[in-house]
Amino acid sequence: MLGLNVPVSRYSGSVVVGQNTALASGVEVLFWSTYQPTPEWGTAFINTALVDVRGRRKPAYDSYKLMTATLADATRAESLFGSERARVVRFTRRNRPPVYVAWADGGAADRVPAPAARAGALERLPALLGGTLQGRTLEVTWYDGTVETVRDLQAEAAGPLRKGPAFIEAR
């Protein structure tokens, strides 16, 4: 199950990875396991809750909120590239331009990223997005809500995914 062995600091990124992997694979509806911890259902339902036992929001809460707001009007998910180490998914949206959700790491969410594997995936990002986004100003929003404007995707080859999963939109 997603997030069982992932530290809280990395779990919020794994929320985006797991949910978007499912959407890119054709899953049409996703439900979160539990909002509040439910220890009577087992440890997994404590670890994967969006708030802690005191009702405080965990980092995953904000990641989930960002993801659902960004993809609220998505009508189609298309995997442009996918491997164990990286994925780029284009979401066509009803009333807004497409958004690309991309990430690169060393594999499963509970493993430390492998620098060489991550670098290889990052090198592919401009090629995967270049035809559509070449020369455009991009807004990159990471899973933690941090936003950065990228003016040259080629120059930022190592940048867009350096912090983890990102939502990439042309502005």
Image (cartoon, rainbow, N blue to C red):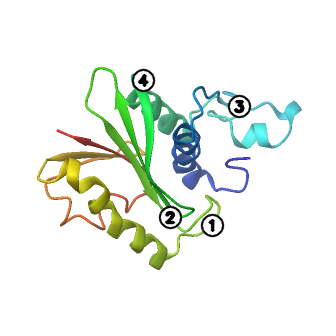
Left or right: residue 38 versus residue 156 is right
Determine the secondary structure under disc 2: loop
The residue to which callout 1 is attached is 111
Q: Determine whether 167 is above or below 131 in the image.
A: above
Tell me how far mark 1 sits from mark 4, CA to CA: 30 Å
Residue drawn at (61%, 58%) of the image: 109
Seen at 65% across and 30% down, the residue is 32
Q: Secondary structure at mark 1?
A: loop
Dot 1 and dot 4 residues touching (CB under 8 Å):
no
Which mark is first along the chain, 3 or 4?
A: 3
157 relative position to 6: left or right: left
Whether tag 2 and tag 4 are in contact, CB under 8 A, the answer is no
The kind of residue on which mark 1 rests is Arg
Cβ atoms under marks 4 and 3 closer than 8 Å: no
Gap in Å between the C-alphas at discs 2 and 1?
9 Å
Q: Reply above or below: 147 against 107.
A: above
Residue 9 x/y as whole percent: 55, 53
Crowding at dot 1, Cα within 10 Å, few <14 / some 14-19 / many 20+, comes out as few
Q: Tell me the number on the disc at residue 33.
A: 3
Question: Quick one: SS at disc 4?
Answer: loop
x, y (%) of residue 163? 40, 59
For the residues labelled 1 and 3, the Cα–Cα distance comes to: 23 Å
Which of discs 1 and 4 lies nearer the camera? The answer is 4
Image spot of residue 148 (x, y percent): 24, 49
Mark 1 vs 4, N-terminal side: 4
Give the CA separation, mark 4 to mark 3.
19 Å
On residue 72, which mark appears?
Answer: 4
Mark earlier in primary sequence (2, 1): 2
Please name the amino acid that badge 4 sits on. Answer: Ala
Identify the residue position indicated by label 2 in the image: 105
Q: Residue at x 45, y 70 (%)?
A: 118
- Is label 2 in contact with label 1 (beta carbons under 8 Å)? yes
